[in-house]
Amino acid sequence: MPELPTGTVTFLFTDIEGSTRLLQEIGERYTDALDEHADILRGAITAAGGVEVGTYGDSFFAVFREPMEGVVAAVEAQRALAAHPWAHGAPVRVRMGLHTGRGDRGREGYVGIDVHRAARIADAAHGGQILLSDATAGLVEPGLGPGLRVRDLGEHRLKDLADTERLHQLDIEGLPSEFPPPRSIRARPSNLPAELTSFVGRESEIAEVERLLESSRLVTLTGPGGSGKTRLAVRAAANVEGSFPDGVCFVDLSGVRDPALVGSTIAKALAIPEDGGRPVLEAVKEYLRDRAVLLILDNFEQVLNAAPLVEELLEAASRSKVLVTSRIVLAARGEHEFLVPPLAPPDPGRVLDLAAFRDVEAVRLFADRARAVVPDFRVDAANAPAVAAITAGLDGLPLAIELAATRLKVLSPQQVQVRLVDRLGLLSSRSRTLPERQRTLRATIEWSYELLEETERELFVRLSIFSGGWTLGSAEEVCDPEAIGLAVLDGLSSLVDKSLVRRIDDGAEVRFVMLETIREFGQLQLTERGALESMLERHGEHFLSLAIEAEPHLIAADQAEWLDRCDVERGNLREALRWAVETGRVDRAQEAAGALWRFWHQRGHIEEGARWFREILALPSGQRATAARAKALIGAGGIAWWERDRETARRCYSEAVDIERALGDPERIAEALYNYAFVVAGDDIEEAAQLFDEALDLFRRAGDERGIARTLATLVIRDAQAGRWSKVAESLEEAVAILRRAGDQLQLAFDLVWLGFAYGRLGKSGEARSAAIEALGLFRAVDNATGIGIALTNLAFLATWEGRHEDAVRLAAAAEQVKLQVGGPPGGFAGILEDDPAEEARAHVDPETARRAWDEGSAMALEDVARLAAGEARL
């Protein structure tokens, strides 16, 4: 980059107007539009002799040694932008601001008030408009060429700047020159509170609130305490202040409890003198009647009964609008609610790109507030995992993040992370500028809690027993609404309205969730009420029963629905298992874990399943030879098999066989024998076949069609080992037909893998690929990662047998990537999936080609891998 000039320089800032809206409108084409815009800006800046200082998103910052150079760059850029043939059909409108002042350089670029003044001037412009400071206008106006004219727009107060600035518009012949008033804080009535700390992020939320204020007269920002409603309202109001000729009035209702006092509080904020002979509300209505004012009513939740007053004001003042912040929706006519979300937190498990990590909103806020107490604080590779855990653990809640950052005065981020087990005790502030209710996180939540009716409080604390959310049905089952005296549906509706519970609609069943900080407060209240143990029991029994109910569905035609259900209830299932272990309900824990193993296996949670089985099976009170222990042993054996741990699988299956033989249930004995035979097959095919024979006989005696089909399929191992692939295919075709009738989607997918392999050995490439692709589709439909890995391995074999050796290497590499992430079986047996398809394919290509194909396969997205497997794409 050329050296940055110093001394007296001219700064240029630019920004696309409505970039968030444009992104939503044109979708994927936005990237091309952004690149074309950048090319135009860079070309104009460079041609005029400027230096690009930096970019942020769609904004440019450039500097020029001479003010006229800056004007030339801005003019040429606007002309080029207006003339450009944008693919999406609509022009990209860019606001620009120029200011001439001191160019003082710091370690990372320019510093000083003149840089901020230039940026604020650009902020005040509209798309397609060029604004000049008084200094720049005075320097360039005498030398402007034909077609350019400077227009004086008067004095304006710019955000965060104490002194006013006389703004000028640069008119360009042939381009639009009529714009709304600058987006500044003009000399009009305004009592917006000063921002004592920097405002971080929220670009899309600000844009949405501004959009709502354009189309609606009553907008309510809702959300839990500490979510940043007031700051968002103030920032959005400052941005739209130019649209309200009679000003913006901020009304602080935090100290008002009596709804009857709201009218007089508004009057005082508007500086309306008292008239003893006239109702105050009438005076307010009369004042607003012919004015265009934006009223901000802050902290409305404790005066909700004053909502009709807001409706009256809006009816009387047709040009005014109201922006409300409240933890509870007003339910007023014409109201548009905007639920203020937490800041986007990072994924604690994926702190990979440090630059991108620092740009996450929650991280930006934490770092900014941390620098207020530790000026040299910087997010680096050492503290990034702790910062991720802190911001994610606090749900992205701005107040909680700010309070946590203040602890860096005495603690490291790593120490703060450790202490977050007691969020409510750790997070407090001694700041005298914060309202009392925001000096501790507990006080912030307690403020909302105290606004609840007693029955609502009881429901709220009971709902805190759920981990990761709940459905209406689960809440009705666990919370015992008859004991509370409140219908759960009614109570949930109220808690959602009061921002203590969030509703999540993912297109399936509606769920409800609490932020973890709010949930912790609820559990403390539950403990204080002496109800924690009873609620843990109700919750535990409900979700252990759900696990057992899920078991037959996890392999059936509706397996996708139930796998998704188990995934979304994963937190609750964990809590239920933990409760069962810690309270000695060993049989229940063993039975539920045994029921869940197919969920852990198919969704790639193998390591978690293994941990649960190790703990549950080792419990001293769980060593009796019971059906529940045998069930858990079979599940543990299955997990060990997929972890490629043959010895553990053999030990678990062997003990399960012994227990089931002692208990004497033919169907259960058959199931244990069937699983045990798999690990035996790795050493002795004949012994395994005998075990499968015995299992088949028992399944037939029990009339278990699905068990019969599974065992018929595995009995092909004798023929497979002998290379009798026609007989293998014939047997598998029979098994597949039975499984289709029985609706066992999981076993059907596995048997289709084997059938495709057998067809491949017979040279029936079309049938082989058809069966293999169907298997891959079944696994993908339910997001069965381990099954996907096996299907890809099979497809790699088929590809090399078809002569597609490079594709075979790619498919083998993709399969290996899946197995590295989620685990996989310890290889095949009896000649089925037993060898390495990549090794077989490499024999037909040179080493460099094989290496390149392996790297390509390792990096491919699953969708591309599937097309490659089907022969629809070649690299």
Image (tube, rainbow, N blue to C red):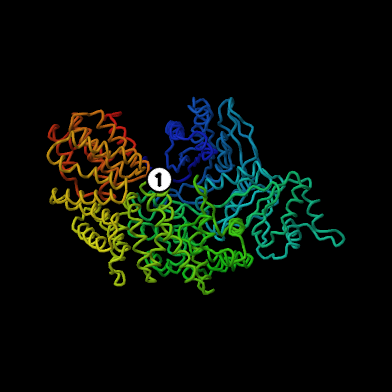
> What percent of the width, then of the height, locates residue 316?
78, 48
Q: Which quadrant holds residue 276?
A: bottom right
Relative side of 510 to 275, left or right? left
* Vertical comparison of 276 with 695: above or below: below
SS for tag 1? helix
Which is more toward the observer, 680 or 670? 670
> What percent of the width, then of the height, locates residue 752?
28, 38
Q: Residue at x 18, y 58 (%)?
A: 647
| Residue at far front of view | 701
Q: Which quadrant holds residue 251?
A: bottom right
Q: Which amino acid, by three-letter code, is at mark 1? A: Ala
Q: Report crowding for label 1: few under 14, some 14 to 19, many 20 or more residues within 10 A (C-alpha).
A: many
Query: Mark 1 — residue?
Result: 560
Q: Residue at x 64, y 32 (%)?
A: 178
Q: Quadrant of the C terminus?
A: top left
Is any atom of residue 161 visible in this view?
yes
Is any atom of residue 433 visible in this view?
no
* Vertical comparison of 471 with 135: above or below: below
* Vertical comparison of 237 with 371: above or below: above
Which is more toward the observer, 610 or 552? 552
Which is more toward the observer, 526 or 133? 526
